[in-house]
Amino acid sequence: MDSIFSAEGLKFFVVVAIAAIVIFLRQRRQHRLAANPKVVKDELERLDDTVLSNVVVSAELGMNDVSHVVVSTYGVFVITVKTEAGKVFGREGDREWQIKSGKQRDILYNPLWENRKHVNALEELTGPVWFIPVVVFTRAVLKGEFPEHVLRLKELVPYIKRQKTSRLSDDKRDEIIQKLH
């Protein structure tokens, strides 16, 4: 009778253990990398559109630092990046959303409101154009009913590519890019 303690059983156990450790370490590394806001810029580089990062614009009560702005034929995507980890619970109209990670619960002010402030500040600078708000979570799992423009990182580029209605002329795009640089 073969036993798990036989040479073959022990080899199998070691191979499975090594594979599990490699998978675990790779997932942890990807999770840490997703905490870096640059990971969003790297994703956006896959687009043919102009990507502006860390756009600083004056606002009513100081300055706003907009994570990323994508200027395309389809509009101006205003992207707010959230790097918190855990499960995110909330609704569009809630003032605060909750993040649960293990037994720890934290509060996150509604990022849709933050994004709206960014859109308003950009509109003051560029004038009225077709703005498309986007909130992207790089490490969180979204639980609940969020609007379609609250996304996980892997959904960001497909969401932008799904936009098919041209809303900005080449001249208007160039004008916006010039104002935001």
Image: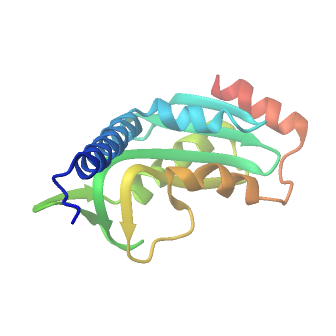
Going 57% across and 68% down the picture, which residue do you hit?
148
Which of the 4 quarters of the picture holds residue 70?
Answer: top right
Q: Taking 19 as reference, is 1 above or below it?
A: below
Structure colour scheme:
rainbow
- Name the quadrant of the C terminus: top right
Which residue occupies the extreme front position in the image?
1
Residue 6, percent from left and from top: 20, 51
Which residue occupies the extreme right position in the image?
170
Relative depth, front residue between 118 and 51:
51
Residue 127, percent from left and from top: 69, 43
Relative depth, front residue between 181 and 52:
52
Going 26% across and 56% down the picture, which residue do you hit?
108
Residue 154, percent from left and from top: 55, 52
How many callouts does the rendering have? 0
Residue 162, percent from left and from top: 75, 60
Going 55% across and 48% down the picture, which residue do you hit?
119
Which of the 4 quarters of the picture holds residue 31?
Answer: top left
Going 54% across and 46% down the picture, which residue do you hit?
79
- Name the quadrant of the N terminus: bottom left
Taking the image as shown, residue 82 lies to the left or right of residue 155, namely left
Q: Taking 61 as reference, is 115 above or below it?
A: below
Taking the image as shown, residue 134 lies to the left or right of residue 18, namely right
Q: Taking 22 as reference, is 155 above or below it?
A: below
Q: Taking 151 as reference, is 41 above or below it?
A: above
Which residue occupies the extreme left position in the image?
103
